[in-house]
Image (spheres, rainbow, N blue to C red):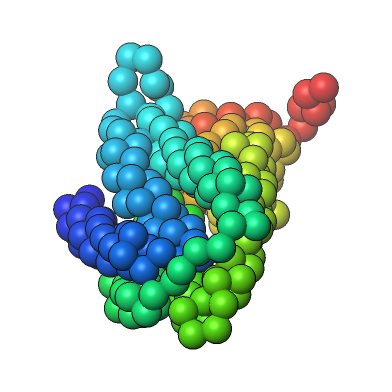
Amino acid sequence: MDGWRLVKSLTILIALSIVGGVLKIYGSVVGGSKSVFVDAATSIANTIAILMILIFFREGMEPPDIDHHYGHYRLAIGGPISMLMLYSFVAGIVTVDLFDSFGKAYRVSYESPIYASIAIIPYGLAVMITKRLHPIVYSYGGFTAIELIESTISILSSLGGAAISYIIDFIGAIALTIYLFYELVKSLREIVIDVSDIAPIDVIDRIHRVARDFGANVERIRVRRIIESIYQGDVVVRVEPSTPIEKAHSVADNIEKELKKQGIDIVIHVEPSNEPKQK
């Protein structure tokens, strides 16, 4: 997906997120539901998060410069990190509110489940759109899917709170908050993996295969994932000692070009096969 289409799709996501958030906020205010309040607070964070993802993604796509010789790809991770911070902030707010409301009776009206139900429509569309976007936006899609789960729980909880007892609504709010913390921990682990310089086995296999296709054998590989589907590093390959220097350079260039097409940006070092291995 090119940059313009991505920006256009993200703009639509922002609009859908705002619509869904406004509906939930209104429902929580006029209906008095705590579960819809948790849902609404998450929606606010969602809207800000997608804006941050857009900003950091555009910065991450900037070409290399004097200070960033390998490009700015890692800046794109700022989006998921910002989203994690926002959701942590929201989790803190709703936790304090639930502690403050514990043991205090309140009234829940039917406006809360009604508006929470309507809000499912824009968030459902948002989830469908994220499946077609760049992988860096998948984390937003995951949290938007949480919005759909939260909406379902908040609808049922607030409906029970309006029809039977506020306790049902309060229990639903607690359940949503616990689930939010669970997703925060899971997302933190995913971000840690993203910045851990992992070298997936399938990428290593691809490097070996491409090198063999051009008549070289891999001696050493040092490669790491920068962001999803983007890898950088260096590789030492060995060719026959009788190989002319010009041909050896051509082999290195061809391997680099082929791997770059696959998102693997590496520097190839060529050594004759009869030399001892480097320690």
Question: Measuring 37% from the left and 15% from the top, which residue is drawn there?
Answer: 67
Quadrant of the drawing holding the N terminus: bottom left
* Residue 275: image location, x then y, percent: 77, 27
- Eyeballing the image, is 144 above or below 187? below
Q: Is residue 189 visible?
A: yes
Residue lying furthest front in this view?
105
The quarter of the picture where residue 33 lies is bottom left
* Residue 167: image location, x then y, percent: 61, 71
- Could you say which is closer to the camera, residue 90 or residue 106? 106
The quarter of the picture where residue 120 lies is bottom left
- Eyeballing the image, is 184 above or below 5? above
Question: Measuring 59% from the left and 32% from the top, which residue is drawn there?
Answer: 234
User: How many numbered markers are drawn?
Assistant: 0
- Could you say which is closer to the camera, residue 115 or residue 275? 115
Q: Is residue 247 visible?
A: no
**In the displayed structure, does residue 55 sit left or right of residue 75?**
left
**In the displayed structure, does residue 106 sit left or right of residue 177?**
left
**In the displayed structure, does residue 55 sit left or right of residue 139?**
left
Quadrant of the drawing holding the C terminus: top right
The quarter of the picture where residue 277 lies is top right
- Could you say which is closer to the camera, residue 129 or residue 20? 20
- Eyeballing the image, is 74 above or below 23? above
* Residue 162: image location, x then y, percent: 46, 79
Question: Measuring 81% from the left and 26% from the top, which residue is drawn there?
Answer: 276
Question: Measuring 44% from the left and 71% from the top, which residue is drawn there?
Answer: 108
* Residue 36: image location, x then y, percent: 44, 65
